Image (spheres, helix red, strand yellow):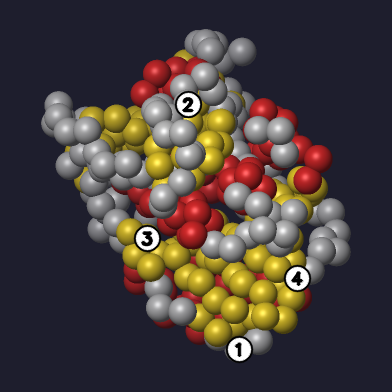
Amino acid sequence: MAWIQIHLTTDRETAPLVELLLEGLDALSVTMEDAADQPLLEPPPGEAPLWNRTRITGLFPEESDPVQLSRDIRNGLPATTKLELEVEHLADQVWERVWMDEFHPMRFGQRLWIAPEGQPPDDPHAIVVQLDPGLAFGTGTHPTTALCLSWLDQAHLQGTSVIDFGCGSGILSVAALLLGANMVTAIDHDPQALQATADNAEKNQVRNNLTILDTQQPLTTVADITLANILAATLIELEPLFATHTRSGGEIILSGILEEQITSVMEAFQDDFQLQPPIILDGWVLLHGRRY
């Protein structure tokens, strides 16, 4: 089997948006690398700085249409975006393991760590999510995921029920369970994401407390906490669903939002949720609210 790689080179500010866009186009993996030989010093725990010129690579199945992918990418970015795009046909390899060479333990908040299997952090008090995402996403390096993980680290999760909408690799679901949640319902439209979530839950020994649903399956849970790390337009579209399935007094955590989208998302949720001031990291936003 072969693959198609889409390489995009852009500036540091645009790179996270390109990464999220490739995920939204169902890339099998997304990686970033230096495009201009710029060294970076070792970052503090939980931080993932980018290069001034960043090369983002999305991997897609061989049957994907590279012309349509290129069109969708350009249509999904502002017209003024400066972007170099190239397409590469790639012979089969163990591509889902290649990026692991650069994946190291990362801390979020005071006690929560994300680490590759077999690389535990040097912290006797750590709560560790062992992660091997394979075909899905979410290692904690993207600001939107980092914001959610840091929120989970300080939240009071003991005995709670959680919905993780757009679960990707299952990183938030697994973290919530390890931090004390009683039950998590993980939801995604991508079968590969659902499989990765199940695998990661099994790896972290929390599979028995996790319900996994395709977006086409009925959601009957009313949760104490609803997490959604997806694009802003989708958050707005799904607001009625989130309101229905978050209990009165329950909490909602929204991420995947750019700074310029704060107002539109807050307006969409303000009738059903009392929202706190936004938390911002590298141009990305987390909104925390409580159901009326």
Question: Dividing the picture into quarters, in which one does residue 51 lie?
Answer: top left
Q: Is residue 284 above or below residue 180?
A: below
- Residue 273 in sight from this viewpoint: yes
Please provide percent x and percent y for residue 132. Answer: 56, 27
Going by the image, does 113 lie left or right of 234? left
Q: Which residue was labeled with disc 1?
A: 271
Q: Where's the N terminus, which quadrant?
A: top right
Question: Dividing the picture into quarters, in which one does residue 258 lie?
Answer: bottom left
Label 4, residues with CA under 10 Å away: few <14, some 14-19, many ≥20 = some
Depth order, front residue of 92/255: 255
Q: Amino acid at mark 4?
A: His
Please provide percent x and percent y for residue 239. Answer: 64, 74
Q: Amino acid at mark 3?
A: Trp
Q: Which residue was labeled with disc 2?
A: 120
Please provide percent x and percent y for residue 292. Answer: 66, 86
Q: Which residue was labeled with disc 4?
A: 245
Q: Which mark is residue 284?
A: 3
Counting residues from the start of the chain, the first of labels 4 and 3 encountered is: 4
Going by the image, does 101 lie left or right of 112? left
Label 3, residues with CA under 10 Å away: few <14, some 14-19, many ≥20 = many
Could you tell me which secondary element the residue under label 3 belongs to?
strand
How far apart in space, not on screen, are marks 3 and 2 (Cα)? 28 Å
